Amino acid sequence: MTEPGAPLFPEPQRRHRIHRGLITDRQEHIFTWIAFIVVLLYVTAWIGALVEIHRLSQTPSFGEGPPGEQPPPPSENITAQLFGPEAPQAAYLTDALLGFLYPLRGASGEVRYVPALPGEEVVEKLPSGTNVAVGGETSPDFVAPDESGIYKFAIELGKARRAIDDLSIITLVPRSLKRGGRIGSYLLGNWPWETGGTPRSPNYAPPEGFIEVTPQNRDFAVSEHFRLGDFLTKDQPNVWPKYLLLSLKLVDKLELTIQELERMGLRVNHVTVMSGFRTPRYNHSGGNTAGRANLSRHMYGDASDIFVDNDRNGRMDDLNHDGRFDVRDAEVIGRAAERVERAHPELIGGVGVYTPCCGHGPFTHIDVRGFRARWQGTGNG
């Protein structure tokens, strides 16, 4: 029962709202004013933002204000984002626009270099509006730099630019620099008809230029499976730079042969080039010369003796799975090369298979001499 005079709904005893019982009334009062000031500052900033938005909405649109005061059109901002220095550039030069480079990669699609003499055209005519940046120069003419070496390049169209990572220009060292059968300290010898007379066919004309190979660039990939150093003549080990002839058609045919072997169900991870380019001097007098022709295609850089060596033990693998390592394995490669020639008659040439001999296992000779030739032999191709 409520006592006489007591309120019907008595007010609860007043407590501090923050940390009940831990701060005084004066401290709570100070806290309240601080909170009020913070809220006031927030509201002021919010009102200022609304005023700025209103002011911008009154700015003349592009083309209405005086020159120099109008904002850039949205298209300018987009262009700057797409083609500015930090923009991703490759996406705007598609593979379709770069179709003129496809033939340079060969029928295999795996060739990664284009040889040319200094100042020689690499591509005869570029698409309209296209420039090439190579060797520090940008030009509408796609020509090899004047200095010998291996050069990356980029294609430009308008403000778009795309670096070509899987193809390089190799500027050759002209044969005119050869003196006494040498370039520098490297002894090459002389090619038939180099000092006079008429070759029996253009395929036997002396070379016009050489690839300069150094310890630094010998591992340059000329294709998916091959490096420059794979094709070097096996002599003068301590003489650098060395000089090399290497036919684009040969590299293309080798890659197509590998592709054909894989279509035949064979795994090909590594191919050894037992003999690639041979200088005239080496072809006539270096090492074991048994079976070497005086006009060997090896001297012209368009022939190679190869074998599949996935386990890298230095000998032909058992390609026909008969448990032996003999000429029948070389014949498997020969059949693949034969199929390549039927599909690509522009790569026609010689295919020879060799039995084990003279400290090496079986191998297959492949070249692009320009006419069909087939043989089986013993010794060097």
Image (cartoon, rainbow, N blue to C red):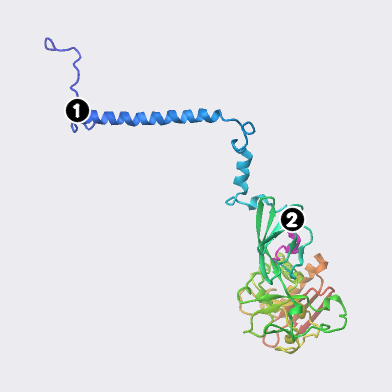
Task: Please report whichever mark, 2 or 1, sits nearer to the chain's N-terminal start.
Answer: 1
Q: Please, is residue 260 above or below residue 304 in the view?
A: above
Q: Quick check: 83 left or right of 191? A: left
* Left or right, residue 46 beside residue 297: left
Q: Quadrant of residue 284?
A: bottom right
Residue kind at label 2, given as amino acid type: Gly
Residue underneath mark 2? 99
Residue 217 locus on image (x, y percent): 63, 73
Residue 102 shown in magenta: yes
Please give the range of residues in magenta: 100-112
Magenta stretch encompasses residue 103 = yes
Q: CA distance from mark 2 to mark 1?
A: 83 Å
Q: Position of residue 128 (x, y in %)?
A: 77, 52
Rendered image: mark on residue 203 = none
Give the label on residue 25, or none.
1
Give residue 254's position: percent from left, percent from top: 73, 70
| Amino acid type at image mark 1 | Asp
Judge the density around disc 2: few (<14), some (14-19), many (≥20) Cα neighbours within 10 Å. few
Q: Is residue 209 above or below residue 102?
A: below
